[in-house]
Image: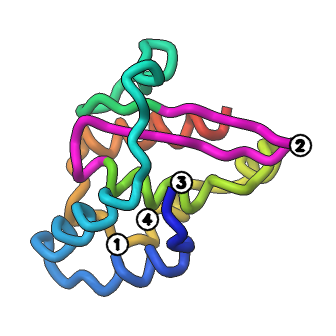
Amino acid sequence: MTDLTRDAIQTRLQACTSKETTFKELVSLSKQLERLTDADKTEENKVKGCESAVWLIEHQDNGVCTFQADSDAKLMRGVLVAILSLANGRTKTELQAMDLATELSQFNLSSYLTSSRTNGILGILKQIQT
């Protein structure tokens, strides 16, 4: 994924003052997300309940989790960059103790997130914590 830190991503998104600027920033962030191969885009890796197709793959090395994700929608890929900045590099215990939804709310995405997208994002966060 990107070298952008959670703080850098949060700062960029918090600086957005309208739905349009948030949209542009999410599209810009989406370019930072490494695309999954077609072989990785399996039903097993697909997140259920998302408005857009989203795939999530978890890797663990010495108990530390790293996630790869992709979507067929640019805007969702931008949101995934924000989500992965919260989750990558943490243990399952740390992830389960976090309120990821509250953490993500600090990224100023509410103007972009419809109720159906919010439900999909909650599904992604749940899968990360499981």
Element type where label 1 sits in the image: loop
- Of marks 2 and 3, which one's residue comes earlier in the chain? 2
As measured in the structure, the alpha-carbon distance from the residue carrying label 1 to the one carrying label 2 is: 33 Å
Q: Earlier in the sequence, mark 1 or mark 2?
A: 2
Q: Quadrant of the C terminus?
A: top right
Front disc: 4 or 2: 2
Secondary structure predominantly adopted by residues drawn in magenta: strand
Q: Nearer the viewer, mark 1 or mark 2?
A: 2
Q: CA distance from mark 3 to mark 1?
A: 16 Å
Residue under label 4, please give it: 105
Amino acid at dot 4? Ser
Q: Which residue is mark 2?
A: 62
Q: CA distance from mark 2 to mark 3?
A: 19 Å
Image height check: is 83 above or below 105? above
Q: Compute the Cα span from label 4 to label 1.
A: 6 Å
> Based on the displayed image, in which of its 4 quarters is residue 50 positioned?
top left
Q: Magenta stretch: give its range.
A: 56-76
Q: Label 4: how many residues lie within 10 Å, few (<14), some (14-19) or many (20+)?
A: few
Choose mark 2 or mark 3, whichever is in front.
2
| Mark 4 vs mark 2, CA separation in Å | 30 Å
Type of amino acid at the residue the image marks with label 1: Asn
Tell me if 61 is positioned left or right of 50 in this view: right
Front of the two marks 3 and 1? 3
In magenta stretch: residue 62:
yes
Q: Position of residue 10 (x, y in %)?
A: 45, 76
Q: Which residue is mark 1?
A: 108
* Residue 74 lies in the magenta stretch: yes
Determine the CA span between mark 3 and mark 4.
Answer: 14 Å
Instruction: Compare marks 4 and 2 and give the one earlier in the sequence.
Output: 2
- Identify the residue at the far left of this view: 20
